């Protein structure tokens, strides 16, 4: 339950090793968040992140839990165990995702399925039981890392873009379904973020950092926003791109 000043006191990061996820958690811990659950596949990496968080002056309690987005059969149990161990979770951040390799994915269905299964199927599978728990507890925010890539699928990464378009649409519908329950959803649409995911890639215009996205997320939580862009100017850029006639859109080197 948020404290008297509205600060988030407990957070679950699904995809706990995410650079954006961890940057967000550091900011929340600086603002009095007392309990952190990092869920993911890489136990060693998550334990290292947990150690770093526990060593901060605020010394939060940090748990590490196994989670694999592709193991959909385990998701209900995963959610039950985390919410039973940590009742009244204030914030859940859906931070897992894979970028994949577009040239391979558009020719090899198996590679494309790896991307859409993790980013879309895995997210739907875990967000439904999470939303049920938020309805039951009558409060809590579900923060979902969507992407500008889902706003209009581009030739250069349409497999990933389509997975984020699906996730974004699902999250918006879920947000509407939660109205009146006390729970809410914040959809986050970052542009190019210089994180592990984009290592070795040339930064796109208006690129940002995990810290920049974390600032947008914490500001969005504080204001009760339903959608945030990171950086904010991308909202207007994408509004134009989205409405370009296809004949013009196809000529762009994107
Ligand atoms: N970076 C960008 O430019 C950008 C832009 C827009 C949106 N986003 C989105 O923001 C989110 C976080 O990205 P990031 O930049 O922080 O990248 P990141 O540091 O690479 O984090 C991605 C995380 O997803 C986890 N993951 C991947 N597949 C998984 C699976 N099957 N089960 C559980 N965890 C899995 C990875 O864990 P492992 O170590 O186990 O692989 C990793 O911790 C992603 O959804 C991404 O699509 C990123």
Image (cartoon, rainbow, N blue to C red):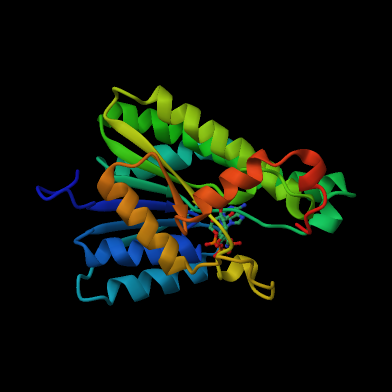
Which residue is farthest left?
Answer: 4
Residue 139 spot, x, y in % from top left: 26, 34
- Compared across the picture, whether 30 is left or right of 106 comes to left
The location of residue 49, given as percent across then percent down, is: 42, 71
Q: Give the position of the N terminus as an image quadrant.
A: top left
Q: Position of residue 116 (x, y in %)?
A: 70, 43
- Residues 253 and 37: in front is 253
Query: Residue shown at 47%/59% (left/top)?
Result: 231
**Residue 218 occupies quadrant:** bottom left
Q: Residue at x 74, y 53 (%)?
A: 157
**Vertical order, 57 against 118 (above or below):** below
The relative height of residue 230 versus residue 57 in the rendered view (above or below) is above
Q: Eyeballing the image, is 220 above or below 202? A: above
- Residue shown at 21%/62% (left/top)? 31
**Residue closest to the eye, 108 or 185:** 185
Q: Looking at the image, how many numbered discs can be counted on the residues? A: 0
Front residue (pair 83, 121): 121
User: Is 57 positioned to the left or the right of 81 in the image?
Assistant: left
Residue at (73%, 57%) from the top-left corner?
100
Would residue 84 appear left or right of 22 to someone viewing this image?
A: left
Quadrant of the image where one finds ligand 1: bottom right
Can residue 71 be seen from the camera position used here? Answer: no
């Amino acid at each position: 339950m948020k404290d008297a000043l509205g600060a988030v006191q407990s957070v679950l990061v699904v995809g706990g090793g995410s650079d954006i996820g961890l940057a967000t958690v550091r900011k929340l811990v600086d603002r009095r968040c007392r309990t952190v659950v990092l869920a993911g596949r890489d136990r060693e990496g998550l334990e290292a992140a947990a150690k770093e968080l526990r060593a901060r002056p605020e010394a939060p309690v940090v748990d590490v839990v196994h989670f694999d987005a592709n193991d959909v059969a385990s998701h209900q149990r995963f959610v039950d165990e985390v919410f039973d161990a940590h009742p009244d979770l204030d914030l859940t951040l859906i931070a897992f995702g894979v970028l994949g390799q577009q040239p391979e994915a558009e020719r090899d269905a198996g590679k494309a399925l790896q991307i859409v299964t993790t980013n879309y199927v895995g997210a739907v599978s875990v967000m439904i039981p999470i939303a049920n728990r938020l309805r039951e507890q009558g409060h809590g925010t579900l923060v979902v890392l969507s992407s500008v890539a889902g706003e209009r699928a581009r030739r250069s990464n349409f497999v990933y873009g389509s997975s984020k378009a699906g996730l974004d649409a699902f999250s918006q519908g879920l947000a509407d379904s939660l109205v009146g329950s006390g729970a809410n959803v914040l959809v986050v649409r970052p542009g190019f973020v210089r994180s592990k995911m984009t290592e070795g890639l040339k930064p796109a215009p208006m690129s940002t950092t995990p810290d920049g996205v974390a600032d947008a997320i914490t500001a969005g939580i504080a204001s009760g926003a339903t959608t945030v862009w990171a950086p904010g100017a991308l909202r207007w850029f994408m509004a134009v791109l989205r409405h370009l006639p296809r004949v013009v859109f196809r000529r762009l080197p994107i």
